[in-house]
Amino acid sequence: MGDSVFNCCYVPPQPPGEEEQHRSRHTGIMASHSSSISPDKRFIIFFDFDETIVDETSDDMVVQAAPGQYLPGWLKDTYQPGRYNEYMQRVLAYLAEQGVTESDLRSIMEKIPASPGMLTLFQFLRNRSAHDFEVVLVSDANTFFIESWLRRAGVRQLFHRIFTNPATFNKNGRLVLRPFHSHECQRCPDNMCKQVVVRDYVARRTQERGRPYQRIFYVGDGANDFCPALSLGPRDLAFPRRDFPMHRLITETHEAMPGEFKAVTVPWVSGEDVITRLRKLVAE
C-alpha cells in the first residue's frame, strides 16, 4: 500500500507530559488479555457490528425508548458531520432525563435481529479448529449496546477482542458514552478510525506471536469499514455487504485508482456467502 493511505490514519502525538499517560491507556485498550489468546491462530477475522452482525443500526434503534419513539427537532439539529459520538452522548442524556432505564435500553438491544446468515457464520467459526480463527469486533457503537446483544445471542465468547466506544452507567442511571480514541484520518469520524485499530492490533499481535497471520479477513458494510479494508494486502479478503457503502467505495476505488485497493473483495448478502469462501481458504 502506498504512503498516501497509511499517512491518512494515525494516532496523533500527545502534548508533553500527556504522551506516556496516553500510550499506557491506549495500549491497555488495545492489548488487554492478549496473553490469553492462542499464539498459533492461522487467521484473524474482524467484524463490524451495526448492519453487519445485526441488521439495524443500534443507535437508531435506541430511539424506540424515547417518548413517542422519536427525538425532538432541537436535539436532532445538534448533529454535526464527523461528530456523531458527541451527538449520541446528548441523545443518551436526553433519554435518561425522560426516565429511560438501563433495562429499557438493554431490552431494545436484545431485540435487534441478526443479519441474514450471521449466526450460522458464527457457528461455523465456533466449530472450527482452535488453531484457525482469532475473532475481533471493531465498531463505532458502544460497549453496552454490543455486549447486551452478543450475550443475548449467546455469542459473546466467540470474540477475543471488542474495540468500541466505552459506555457505562453513572450513579444517576445515565449511560455515559466516551470516544474510543483520537486520530487524524480525514475519512473517519473524530472518535474512531478503524484502520488505526486494525493496523495497531495486527502489528501488536504479530509481534506477540512472532509471526504474521496467513490471511486477514474484514467483514463490514459502512463507509467507516472501507478505511480499515484499505490496509489489507493481496492475500487478505474484504467482505463488504453487497450494495452498502463499503462495497460502493471499493468499487469506485477500483475504477478510479486501479491497484490502490489490494484485498480480494467478496460481497455478501448472507453470512453463508462468507462461510463459502472461508471454507475453501481453510482447506488450503
Image (cartoon, rainbow, N blue to C red):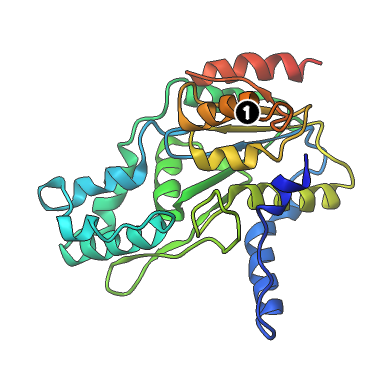
Residue at the location (54% across, 55% down)? 192
**Residue 18 in sight from this viewpoint:** yes
Q: Nearer the viewer, residue 18 or 144?
A: 18
Residue extending furthest toward the right: 210
Q: Position of residue 34 (x, y in %)?
A: 72, 53
Q: Position of residue 92 (x, y in %)?
A: 29, 60
Q: Nearer the viewer, residue 82 or 100?
A: 82
Q: In what quadrant of the picture does the N terminus appear? A: top right
Q: Position of residue 127 (x, y in %)?
A: 64, 24
Q: Position of residue 65 (x, y in %)?
A: 20, 50
Residue extending furthest toward the bottom: 17
**Residue 158 in sight from this viewpoint:** no
Q: Is residue 59 left or right of residue 32?
A: left
Residue extending furthest toward the front: 256
Secondary structure beneath disc 1?
Answer: helix
- How many marks can you see? 1
Q: Is residue 122 left or right of residue 131?
A: left
Residue 116: image quadrant is: top left
Q: Is residue 21 above or below residue 201?
A: below
Q: Is residue 41 above or below residue 128?
A: below
Residue 124: image quadrant is: top right
| Amino acid type of the residue that numbered disc 1 sits on in the rendered structure | Ala
> Pointer 1: residues within 10 angstroms few (<14), some, or many (20+)?
few
- For label 1, the residue is 256
Residue at the location (29% across, 67% down)? 174
Residue at the location (76% across, 54% down)? 35
Q: Is residue 57 above or below residue 261?
A: below
Q: Is residue 29 left or right of residue 166?
A: right
Residue at the location (34% across, 47% down)? 59
